[in-house]
Amino acid sequence: MILQGCGGDLNNWVKEFTNMLKDEGIVNDSFSFDEVYSFENDNLINLAFAINNGNIDIGKLAIFRLKLRNVFGAMWLSDYIDNYLKDIKEINKKPKAPIVGADGNVFNLIGICSQTLKRAGYHDQAKEMVNRVTNSHSYEEALSIMCEYIEPTDQYGTSFEEIDVFDEDIEI
């Protein structure tokens, strides 16, 4: 969750926000945030609270966030990115690499991914990816690492999620 316009002592913001969550019954008394990040955007200091603890009542938190919307500009991170950081989506977009249906030899896939990254201008990431993959311990780990850097597609640029892997004519 993002709180906007958090001037002053950021530690007090974290402490008070945590107390508010406790008072609302959203978290238990022993709760504390593992990760809180501060960042500036449009001359506002904002806090991003990582909510990855299983002891949070998400339903109550969602309602509480709505109450805080007008006071602290509270919103989910995904909403903040959509509304305030639209350019970050393009920055973090992975280049499409045609590895689906390609020769599955790991070295062939490394080459495809490396060339895709270089063509997209990510020369340092290409070197990093090759180094990480060649030091991996399994084929699955190697594929996982490659997919951190690229979006797997078929030779026509269709993303993995769009590819229909089942033939409708086959009867079981």
Image (tube, rainbow, N blue to C red):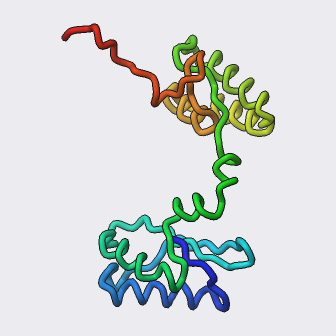
Residue 117 placement, left or right of 97? right
Quadrant placement of the C terminus: top left
- Which residue occupies 67% across, 91% down? 8
State the residue at coordinates (48%, 85%).
17
Q: Nearer the viewer, residue 71 or 55?
A: 71
On the picture, is 68 further left or further right than 13? Answer: left
Question: How far from the left and from the top, in percent, is residue 15?
Answer: 50, 88
x, y percent for residue 158: 54, 23
Residue placed most toward the observer, 107 or 16: 16
In the drawing, does residue 54 fall left or right of residue 154?
Answer: left
Please determine whether, in this image, residue 131 is positioned above or below residue 11.
above
Q: Residue furthest left?
A: 172
- Residue 166 percent across, percent down from the top left: 34, 17
Q: Residue at x 54, y 83 (%)?
A: 72
Could you say which quadrant of the image residue 93 lies in?
A: top right
Residue in view at x 43 percent, y 64 percent: 52
With 131 as the anchor, is 153 left or right in this view? left
Q: Measured along the vertical axis of the image, is residue 92 above or below residue 14?
A: above
